[in-house]
Structure formats: C-alpha cells, structure tokens
Image (cartoon, rainbow, N blue to C red):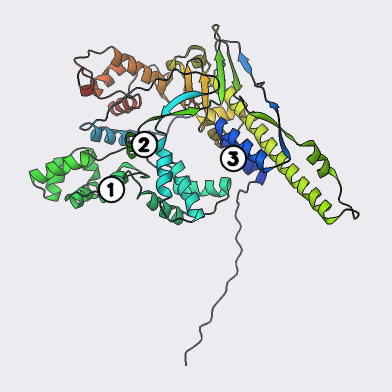
Amino acid sequence: MAQRQEQNLVQSQQQKTQQILSPQQVLQVRILELSATELQERINLEMADNPALEAGEDSSNDDQVEYMDSACEDTSQTDDISREEEQRREALDDVLQSILQDDEPDYTANENEDTDRGFFSFSDTTSFYEELLRQMHEYNLTEHETKLLEYLIGNLESDGYLRADIDTMCEELAIYHNIDTDEEEMARMLDVLHDFDPPGIGARNLQECLLLQIRRSQSRLSDIMRKVIEEHFEEFTLKHWGKIKKDMHLTDAVCEEVFCELTHLNPKPGAAIGDVMGRSMERITPDFIVETDDDGRVSFSINSAGMPSLMVEPAMEEMAKEKAVGTMSRSQQEAVTYARTKVAEAKSFITAVQQRRQTMYRTMKTIISLQHAFFATGDEAQLRPMILKDVAERAGLDISTVSRVNNSKFAQTRWGVYPLKFFFTTQMKNDEGEEVSTHAIKQELKDIIATENPQKPLSDDALAKMMKTKGYPVARRTIAKYREQMGIPVARLRKPGV
C-alpha cells in the first residue's frame, strides 16, 4: 500500500516597496516621450476617439525666453565619468579600430543646410528600425511577445548593439508600459532578435557580435574561428596571432586564413542595414526653434506649428455636470455616465499635453542657459561639459524626465538642426587642469587633420602627440574613436586618390 505523502503548506509574510504610477502619470510619461510629429498624430487619434476632446485655434508659440547677456552664470556642476566605464569604452573602440584597420569602410560627411521653420530634411538610415520590424512580423509571435521584441529593437543603438541591461528594461516595461515580464522571457526574445539579419544584430558586446556572425557563417573554418573568439579573445584583440597559433597548434596557412576571415566580420552590424537598404530623406519636425540675433541674444520657442490647442467640448462638459436622478431613463443615465468618462479622459489628456509643454520648456531653457556660448556663436568648441544630472538639478526635474525630453527631440538653430543629445557632452581636463568638453577636443583634432600634409597624413599616434602639445593629453585609442565619430578615415585612406 503506497503511503500518502503529506504536503506541508507554509504561509509567510513579505514586505517590499514597489513603485506604482497612477494612470495620469503613465499618460504624462508617454506623451512626454513623443516627438512633435508623433504628438500631432496622437492628438488626431485622441480627438477621433473622444467626442469630448475638441480642437480650438492653433496654439501660438508663447513660451519664449531671451538671454540678454552674452555669457551666463557658471554652473558646470558635472560628474566625472567613472574610470571603469571610460576604460571599457576605450577598450571596445580599440578593438573595433584593430578590426577595421584592414577593412576600413567608406566615410561620408553629411551636411544639412535646410533650416525650414516647420520641418527640415534629415538624411538617415531610416530603414534600420523599419527593416527589423518587417523581419519581426515574419515570426509567429503572440501580441505580448511582439511588444517585448519591439521594445528590444527600440533600445538598439545605431551600431546595432543592445547596451541596455535586461533587468532595467524589465523594470521600465513594468513601470512605464504596464507590461509584466522577467529576465528569462526577455532573454528568450533577445535570442529571436539574434536570428535577424544582418548577423550580429542585438549583441551585447563585440565578442558576442562576432560569435553570432560566426554561428551563421558557412565557412569551413567556423569551428576554429569560434574557438579563437571564445577562448582567445584577448589575444585576438591584441593581434597576438603567434600565441594563438601556438596554443591552438595551427599551421601558418590556416592561421592566415582564419585571420583573414575574422577581420572581415562586421563589428557594427547596425550600419550594414543602411548599406543594403540605402539612405533616404526623412522629414522631421524640430521640437524647438532657437533664434540668435547678431548681438548674441538667444530666444527659443516650442514648435507648435499646425498643432491645435485643446479644449473640452462644452455640451459634453455640461452633460457631465448633470446629476443622475430617478426621473431619468436608463438611456439618459448611461449618457451622463458616458459623458463623465469622456470628459475626464479629455481633461486628463489636455493636462498631460500641457505638462509636456511645461517640462520641455524648463528643460530647453536650462540647456540654453548652460550652453549659451554655443547658441550665441555656433562654435562647437564652446560647448561646455554637461550631463543629464546638470540639467535635472537646475531645472528642478528628475533625471529620467530630462532623459525622455532628450530622446528623439530636435532643435532648429541659426547654426543648423541638432538632436538634443548633441548638447550633452562629457569632459576631460587639459594640462592646465581646466575642464573641457569632448566637442572642443574633436574640433581641435579636426583642425589638425585639416592642416596636415595630404601626401603624408598623420597617424593616430602622431595625432595624439600633436594634441598633447596643444594641451590635450588624449590617448591614441581615444583619438581613433573621435576620428571615427567625425567620419574621418584612417591615415592611409586620407591620401589623395585612395
């Protein structure tokens, strides 16, 4: 006779703190994240769905500020980038430079002179996001899985890497999008993304990027290539092929062939989509219009061209104020309840739009205050070190709020059209102990390259030595990083006729 196993049930209490946003806060966050074009679309959809929401006259750009002084108060309270993070970034860029040295891609400068007030032309690889979404729809995914994968794609950087932590994305999905998930599920969706083209998309680091490409490779040397990256990655990044050859017992011919195969892998898979799909012209509406007069006075306004002011439809609002009484029929009571619901939704939406405007106003006012020298002169070297924390503290906002304003928003200035991210720059100290922004360093580097002998272009080592003589002790790998970010090729490709 089988013994019956007893099941012990234990009841326990657990106390934890969990941040829960109200529906109004969630709405405000989502509205804040929208660009000017997206907000117009959202307003049109909301008015079509809610009869209590009505468009009034076109709103005017009345949020305008002038800075009469040519210089603003010194408020450079910036935090140093942690040494560990800087070393990690430099190490990654150094490896990329090593791989790209033998297979350098073409570089093109993209200048934009269109400064229409309502919109401007912005050339970009617009197919990057759209192409990944197109591939996503080829998979048989649930609605929940589709939302998760869309969020992963939305967090990819322009080079195709996913540098956001999975646990952080899980928290953001729960707090801001009311989507519950866990790290295991997100990791599974990331595996789906890794199957997309081009190979390597969604990698967390260079090593994973190369391994993903090797996994899809048809080369007969795939196993050896994978072993090199998995077990000898450090030696590979340092180009210590003698040690790799000895440890793996490779012949000279095999070692040379493996090296050739590995150096032709793409360290930036995100750029590959743009190469395949081509570049297209996209119309983007700037969110801010910044004006600078000849005396250096700067004013700005929030671009609301074509965006209607919003109001509650009077008849619906009057109906919502009525009290349901016993003499009312059932249909009349339902009409009053419906009116109250729609009026409440309309007021909530209007409040969120107004809050967005106020937040954007405070953020841009602070950015102009901190970067007044650039807006007055257009000289990138005048950009001072500034991080999100600086703007948040001065504007009296949360860092996450400033981050949302900073994301996907553009400012039209006298000197061109810039994403807000352009005005945020890190810092370093020159030989005199003064804090200078990376923009100033890049400008100095650009000036040196512009005056070099075309027949004998300067190597990165030579550029680093010249920068040091000018008071900027910048490492060679940092020079390579800045040069690449500015679209300037390596020395051998800067020779005439190459």
Q: CA distance from mark 3 to mark 2?
A: 26 Å
Q: CA distance from mark 1 to mark 3?
A: 37 Å
Please name the residue shown 86% across and 51% down the image.
324
Q: Are marks 1 and 3 in contact (CB under 8 Å)?
A: no
Circle nearer the N terminus (3, 2) = 3
Please name the residue shown 63% across and 36% down the image.
43
In the picture, measured across the screen, residue 182 lies left or right of residue 84, that is right
Residue 498: image x %, image y %?
Answer: 20, 21
Q: In the figure, 63 relative to 82: above or below?
A: above
Q: Residue furthest right?
A: 327
In the picture, measured across the screen, residue 211 lies left or right of residue 420, that is left
Q: Residues within 10 Å of mark 1 (few under 14, many from 20)?
A: many
Q: Secondary structure at mark 3?
A: helix
Q: Residue furthest left?
A: 252
Mark number, residue 159: 2
Residue 55 sits in which quadrant? top right
Question: Is residue 76 visible from the viewing direction of this image?
Answer: no
Q: CA distance from mark 1 to mark 2?
A: 16 Å
Q: Amino acid at mark 1?
A: Leu
Q: Amino acid at mark 3?
A: Arg
Q: Amino acid at mark 2?
A: Asp
Q: Which residue is mark 1?
A: 211
